[in-house]
Amino acid sequence: MEKIIEIVLSGLSMGSIYSLLALGFVLIFKSTGVLNFAQGEFAMVGAFICYTFASLMKLPYLVAFPIAIVLGAVLGVVIYALFLRRMIGESIFSTIMLTVGLASILTSTAGLIWGHDVYLLASPFTNKVVSIRGIILSQGALYTILVSLILFIVFLRFFNHSLLGISMKGTAEDTDTAGLMGINVRMIHMIAWAIGGIVAALAGMFLAEQSFVRLEMSHVGIKAMAAAILGGMDSIAGAVLGGVIVGIVESFASSYLSGLEFANFHTGDIKEVAAFAVMILVLMIRPQGIFGKEKVERV
Amino acid sequence: MLTVTNLEITYNDIILALKGISLRVPKGRIVALLGANGAGKSTTIRTISGIRKTLDLKIEDGQVEFDGQVINDLEPHEIVAIGLMQVPEGRRIFAELTVEENLIIGSYSLSDRRKFVQNLERAFTYFPILKARRDQMAGYLSGGEQQMLAIARALMADPKLVMLDEPSLGLAPLVVQEIFEIISRINQDEGVGILLVEQNATAALSIAHHGYIIETGRIMLEGTSEALKENRDIREFYLGLTEVGAKKSFRDVKHYKRRKRWLS
Ligand SMILES: Nc1ncnc2c1ncn2[C@@H]1O[C@H](COP(=O)(O)OP(=O)(O)OP(=O)(O)O)[C@@H](O)[C@H]1O
Ligand SMILES: [Mg+2]
């Protein structure tokens, strides 16, 4: 029993990271119609920024953390203003190619600045565990789950109860009409990219708690994308749920299926494909994703 | 007051949709803009609303002026901010949001947020059905209710002037009558000016003070509602009240009766 709970909790902590990234992914897509393939790279840059301030400049983690969040937002806004503002309304393929290009530029720039090694983020939770009734969990994982949970509640309230959040949903549904309601559509797009940058920076810093800071962190982006598609690419709740499912499935797969040998067949690191296997399975049953709505027809 | 002078509009730099239109909506009045399909009615109010980029619409000549300010180059949200609201063709409510969320978005430009509750109550007084449907997804409303929501949403911003693009579109005559009566009441009670774009001339002239007839991008005729209702051409083309027409429909009725008798 303890083992199961440990697996679920560790799945939840990875799942929170996927959820955060998936949330940014869905938000940007719904608001601006851009599939941001650089979401994982945003996370990697966020982790490196935190590492720079916390580990290299030896600032307290509590200072480095908000700096990384703010710079994450700035990164999102700058990328939007420089490259994607003009692309609104263009074909989805050209915007995909643009973000794929940006992703590789971000990776090589980060490589130039920080190098290709593996670094440790100095945080108050490094190498510490909590143990409750025989269940052992790293403090970093617990911290990830708790902070993410608070964030998701804040986001849900923002999108369902605040004027700006509701207006963002409206803009996502019908940009022209949003303009006719007095909404500055370009500002809404910018805010969506800022939030996308913030959640990515958070995901990057949380991921650094689980392992190290390095360029390859950005690979988390593609799994978050699978999570977003699994959740339906439509709602915050869907993205969060998709992320949690991917995290937990991965966690079980790595505990029970990794490294097994059947006859001469070695399952290897099955964890890496679990996310996609689940995504494909779900899409075969529900092509619009778990939470994806079929469009409401206009009367 | 809204003043449009000599407006010339192209789409995609080639299609000349408006060929020099002039019209005026005095403060607190209802002005009807009547015309057939493709006459340029929607183009006129899209231009006034500042929707240019997404439609590739360009002002080649002329001027749009509101309360003494030339608004040719303003963005849609800036035009809303000075008190001009549009209820677009086909209603364009936010189908995936609730009725209340639609109204909240309508209030986006209200700078004094304390007025929100007051305006929401006012919207519910004019359209009680929306209060009952408040938490429902707007996409599931009937066509008439969606039109009511679109009008209520525009009202949330405390506009000085509302432009309605074919509010009667696709609605049953009784619903049209109900909605037009409410539009007239809003105009009288709130002093909101109305530019009413319509194909349904009968309904529009029943509440408008003044009217313009637009045909292929030009204003052909203008006058008070009374004058327009008496005008021979209008009676013939827009109100369907010609002698020939009357006779024809009379014959149709007789024919129908005969057939029915034969069948029974
Ligand atoms: N987005 C567009 N791109 C190109 N041409 C357009 C566009 N919208 C309208 N037009 C053209 O401009 C002219 C006027 O159209 P408009 O939509 O203003 O007519 P309307 O009077 O509103 O007609 P309806 O009653 O059918 O709504 C038409 O010839 C139409 O083909
Ligand atoms: Mg039209």
Image (cartoon, rainbow, N blue to C red):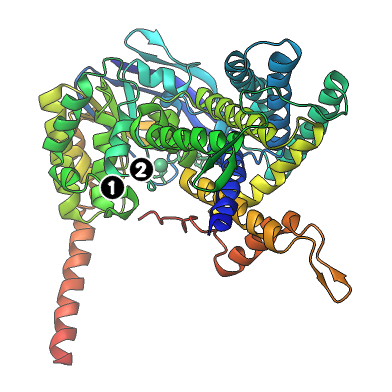
From the viewer's perspective, is residue B160 above or below residue B146?
above
Which image quadrant for residue A18?
Answer: top right
Residue A166 rendering spot, x and y as whole percentages: 38, 34
Please give the name of the residue rendered at 68% of the width and 43% of the height, measured from the top-left corner.
A91
Ligand 2 within 8 angstroms of badge 1 C-beta: no
Mark 1 surroundings within 10 Å by alpha-carbon count, few (fewer than 14), some (14 through 19), many (20 or more): many
Q: Nearer the viewer, residue B92 or A112?
A: A112
**Do the residues bearing badges 1 and 2 touch, measured as CB atoms within 8 Å?**
yes
Seen from the viewer's position, the closer of residues B47 and B186 is B186
Residue at image coords 46%, 42%: A173
> To which chain does the residue with label 1 belong?
B
State the mark number for residue A20: none
Q: Amino acid at mark 1?
A: Gln
Letter of the chain that mark 2 sits on in the rendering: B
Q: Residue furthest top?
A: B68
On the question of residue A158 being in view, the answer is yes
Residue A52 vs residue B254: left or right? right
Which residue, given by chain and number where applicable, does mark 1 sit on?
B146
**Residue flagged by tag 2: what amino acid is it?**
Ile
Residue B201 vs B141, above or below: the answer is: above
In the rendered image, which quarter contains the C terminus of chain A? bottom left
- Looking at the rendered structure, which numbered label has been put on residue B93? 2
- Sequence-wise, which precedes: disc 1 or disc 2? 2
Q: Is residue A282 left or right of residue A223?
A: left
Which secondary structure, mark 2?
loop
- Which x, y percent locates residue A16? 56, 42
Q: Is residue B19 left or right of residue B154?
A: right
- Image height of A290 relative to B157, above or below: below
Q: Residues within 10 Å of mark 2 (few under 14, many from 20)?
A: many
